[in-house]
Image: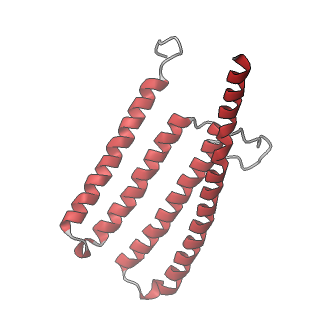
Amino acid sequence: MNSIERAVERVIFASRWFQVPLYLGLVAVLVMLAAKFVLELGHLSVELWTMGESSVVLAVLTLVDVVMVANLIVMVVISGYENFVSRLELEDAADKLSWFGKLDAGSLKIKLASSIVAISSIHLLKAFLDVNDIPNDKVLLLIAIHLTFIASALLLAYLDRMVGHRRPDGDRH
């Protein structure tokens, strides 16, 4: 029975490699977002001189939003791969990220939640800038969703802090 158990454990452990196509798919989405950013930037550079101030701010917020989503994808791909698939052997890389190798699953969740709050803030600000064209009930719904994201991020941070400050023996640091 021991050899069967070891074989099952090896298969289960090797199954982590099924995540690689998912991470590569996110890299493909990142490439598409970069193309979208370039298109939006081109549109803004052509139309900038004829746009009103509010429209310029909305266009810039759209670019910032794309960058925030791209940052989120990079964090998920790098941290997820390193935490769940395999270590990235990049010790000699000169441009290694400051958080590289430091994000565990809990820290990643908090960073993701924070990024989602930031992205939601941008969408909410865009709605406020375009408030004359958006029904009040939709604005209230956007505010409620944003507050839900904030509450979720705070709760995740609180829970991570509670769990993160315990030693394996159960004592607090």
Q: Position of residue 112 (x, y in %)?
A: 48, 46
- Identify the residue shown where x is 30% and y is 70%: 129
Residue 91, picture quadrant:
top right
- Identify the residue shown where x is 55% and y is 72%: 36
Query: Dividing the image into 4 quarters, which one contains the N terminus?
Result: top right
Residue 98 can be seen in this image: no
- Identify the residue shown where x is 45% and y is 24%: 163
131 to 155, vertically: above or below: below
Using residue 105 as the reference point, say whether residue 55 is left or right of it: left
Q: Position of residue 67 (x, y in %)?
A: 53, 62
Residue 53 can be seen in this image: yes
67 to 72, vertically: above or below: below
32 to 4, vertically: above or below: below
- Identify the residue shown where x is 57% and y is 35%: 104
Residue 5, picture quadrant:
top right
43 to 24, vertically: above or below: below
